[in-house]
Image: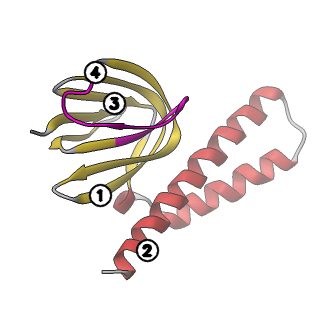
Amino acid sequence: MPIHLEIVTAERVVLSDEVDQINAPTKDGRIGILPRHMPLLTILDVGELDIIKNGEVTAFAVTGGFMEVLPTRVTILADAADRADEIDEARAEEARRRAEALLSQRRSDQEMALAEAELRKALIQLKVAALKNLKQRNQ
């Protein structure tokens, strides 16, 4: 019995599908969600979100948000969510370099916080893209 998953950002519905398992990065650590999970509302952290369907894992890079878990449905309201195969690695690498350059300069606390957030986003995108590339090489 699968569980219905919706991943939504401000810009689009990223995914709406029946899945077997969800592994999500939360502020309290990674958690796994299976069908008939107890109700839960949690804050997502920046990290890798794995969706398992028919034994196949699909990775997403998420940069925070909320996850509502009900026994038959999971809704993820993400700040940003990118499927591994949607990530432009060159663009993510450039964002990483830009953020690191900003962090090396002494700027306002607000600018530093924004640069740190950009760096975390770029790093998780690069990690998820690297996992996709590794998976493709091993096939």
Q: Quarter-wise, where is residue 56 in the image?
A: bottom left
Q: Which mark is residue 127?
A: none
Q: Amino acid at mark 4?
A: Met
User: Disc 4, disc 2: CB below 8 Å?
Assistant: no
Query: Of helix, strand and loop, which one carries label 1?
Result: strand
Frontmost of labels 1 and 3 is: 1
Please report the residue visible at 70 percent of the width from the left and 40 percent of the height from the top. 116
Separation (CA) of disc 3 from disc 4: 16 Å
Q: Could you tell whether 129 is left or right of 115 in the image?
A: left
Please report the residue visible at 84 percent of the width from the left and 29 percent of the height from the top. 108
Please report the residue visible at 31 percent of the width from the left and 42 percent of the height from the top. 22
Q: Which residue is mark 4?
A: 38
Q: Which residue is mark 1?
A: 57
Separation (CA) of disc 1 from disc 3: 17 Å
Instruction: Identify the mark nearer the N-term, 4 or 2.
Output: 4
**Label 2 neighbourhood size at 10 Å, few (<14), some (14-19), many (20+)?**
few
Query: Of helix, strand and loop, which one carries label 3?
Result: strand
Can you give x and y, in whole percent of width and height, for residue 88 in the image? 46, 62
Frontmost of labels 1 and 4 is: 4
* 26 magenta-colored: yes
User: Where 8 sits versus 54, above or below?
Assistant: above
Q: Amino acid at mark 2?
A: Leu
Q: Residue furthest left?
A: 1
**Label 4 neighbourhood size at 10 Å, few (<14), some (14-19), many (20+)?**
few
Frontmost of labels 4 and 2 is: 4
Q: Nearer the viewer, residue 48 or 122?
A: 48
